């Protein structure tokens, strides 16, 4: 198959999932085309064969904001005219699903082909940005116009259907984890050290509740020798540094910055700590589990679908710093428990999230979409949407 992958070039969340999936598809012999305004960090140095199409967004004084949506649509359109794509798989609904839909309509208007569009919902695209009044109608329209829609957790599927007027079925396909990259250290002694390493990986946005990480660590460090390793960068980074200083934790906390490959750091970790107020899946949690690292996290969103409470780690209510700290201390002070939870975590990833398993699920979806009949250039879902609106109007009038 000739597959287009549209994603943001960031090293977290949807960007990581999209690039890892694209590389896995390439290894299976598919022709993969990536579209982004910058080359995704995880494609740098990649050995897999792929095509990268840079989305050039020209600046013009009249435009207050660069028209990325239109530039992306044009790039997909022009590429597919030269190298006809069977489908475009967009990650993150805003604005990628809209751009892909526009490109598809442009191709159909010329009678050249019927490129299929698959949209994967990742979380903040629906729960945060997508609900903004300026975007919501277009998000609903573009998702209904997709040939298939997937969500990264059952939680996200349910939340999307509750919060949006969407008539398209949503299939749950979990995020893929490379269990060869994310694996336990080969040297079993490498995790035996005086101080325990606690890792937190995030984009330092308010939703991650970075202060809770630091406050929980303050309690942990008072009970057992430990260090806190922060991976990532974002708007709350400076505030976190100030809080670390106020609590006198400078010698115990390290800010490592963004890292393309966190696998090596996880090999040195004893625990992963997540304090988010919302996670649709929790990619870093699954990566830690694959590395045989127990997880202590807030019980929010799709996290319970990843972390099995009491088996692969512990879950605590959002904002319960004391509960998070107590769970971490329980693990860090009991090597047998840490080892048992670590091994159970990797086994869970192998059973549910392994990259080969997830890639096969997407291949099956692609085949279904390509073999399905499509009504002209507009999907059946749009016709159903219009019929639904007419029915509502009739009921209102009566």
Image (cartoon, rainbow, N blue to C red):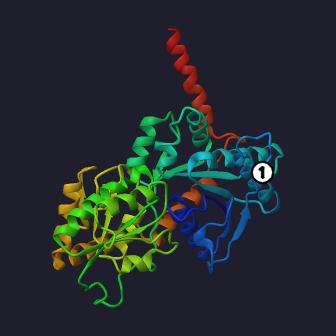
Residue 368 at x, y = what percent? 57, 56
Residue 204 at x, y = what percent? 44, 57
Q: Quadrant of the N terminus?
A: bottom right
| Rendered residue at 33%/76% (across/down) | 269
Q: Which residue is mark 1?
A: 74
Q: How many marks?
A: 1
Tell me if residue 245 can be seen. Answer: yes
On the rendered structure, is 274 left or right of 260?
A: left
Pick the residue in front: 114 or 139: 139
Asked if 128 appears above or below 324 in the picture, the reply is above
The part of the image, by quadrant, that contains residue 241 is bottom left
On the rendered structure, is 293 left or right of 281?
A: left
The part of the image, by quadrant, that contains residue 265 is bottom left
Q: Residues within 10 Å of mark 1 (few under 14, many from 20)?
A: some
Residue 189 at x, y = what percent? 28, 90
| Rendered residue at 61%/78% (across/down) | 46
Asked if 252 appears above or below 36 in the picture, the reply is below
Tell me if residue 310 can be seen. Answer: no
| Rendered residue at 25%/60% (across/down) | 216
Secondary structure of the residue carrying numbered label 1: helix
Residue 93 at x, y = what percent? 57, 47
Pick the residue in front: 268 or 122: 268
The part of the image, by quadrant, that contains residue 208 is bottom left
Pick the residue in front: 235 or 147: 235
């Amino acid at each position: 198959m000739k597959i287009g992958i549209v994603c943001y070039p960031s090293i977290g969340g949807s960007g990581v999932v999209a690039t890892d999936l694209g590389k896995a598809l390439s290894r299976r012999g598919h022709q993969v085309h990536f579209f982004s305004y910058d080359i995704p960090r995880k494609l740098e140095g990649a050995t897999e064969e792929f095509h990268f199409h840079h989305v050039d967004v020209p600046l013009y004084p009249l435009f207050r904001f660069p028209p990325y949506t239109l530039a992306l649509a044009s790039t997909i359109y022009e590429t597919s005219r030269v190298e006809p794509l069977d489908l475009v798989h967009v990650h993150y609904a805003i604005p990628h699903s809209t751009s892909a839909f526009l490109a598809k309509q442009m191709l159909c208007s010329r009678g050249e082909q019927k490129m299929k569009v698959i949209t994967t919902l990742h979380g903040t695209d629906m729960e945060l940005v997508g609900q903004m009044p300026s975007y919501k109608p277009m998000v609903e329209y573009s998702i209904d116009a997709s040939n298939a829609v997937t969500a990264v957790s059952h939680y996200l599927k349910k939340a999307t259907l509750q919060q949006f007027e969407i008539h398209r079925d949503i299939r749950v396909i979990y995020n893929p984890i490379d269990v060869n990259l994310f694996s336990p250290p080969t040297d079993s002694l490498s995790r035996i050290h005086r101080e325990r390493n606690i890792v937190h990986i995030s984009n330092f946005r308010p939703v991650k509740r970075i202060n809770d990480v630091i406050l929980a660590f303050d309690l942990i460090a008072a009970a057992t020798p430990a260090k806190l390793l922060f991976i990532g960068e974002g708007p709350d980074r400076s505030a976190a540094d100030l809080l670390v200083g106020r609590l006198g934790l400078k010698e115990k906390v390290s800010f490592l910055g963004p890292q393309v490959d966190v696998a090596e750091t996880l090999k040195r970790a004893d625990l992963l700590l997540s304090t988010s107020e919302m996670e649709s899946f929790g990619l870093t949690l699954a990566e830690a589990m694959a590395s045989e690292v127990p997880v202590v996290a807030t019980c929010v969103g799709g996290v319970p679908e990843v972390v099995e409470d009491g088996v692969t780690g512990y879950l605590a209510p959002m904002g319960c710093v004391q509960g998070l700290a107590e769970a971490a201390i329980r693990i860090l002070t009991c090597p047998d428990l840490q080892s048992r939870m670590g091994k159970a975590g990797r086994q869970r990833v192998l059973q549910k999230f392994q990259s080969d398993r997830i890639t096969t699920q997407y291949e099956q979806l692609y085949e279904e979409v390509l073999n399905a009949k499509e009504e002209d250039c507009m999907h059946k879902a749009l016709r159903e949407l219009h019929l639904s609106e007419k029915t509502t109007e009739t009921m209102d009038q009566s």
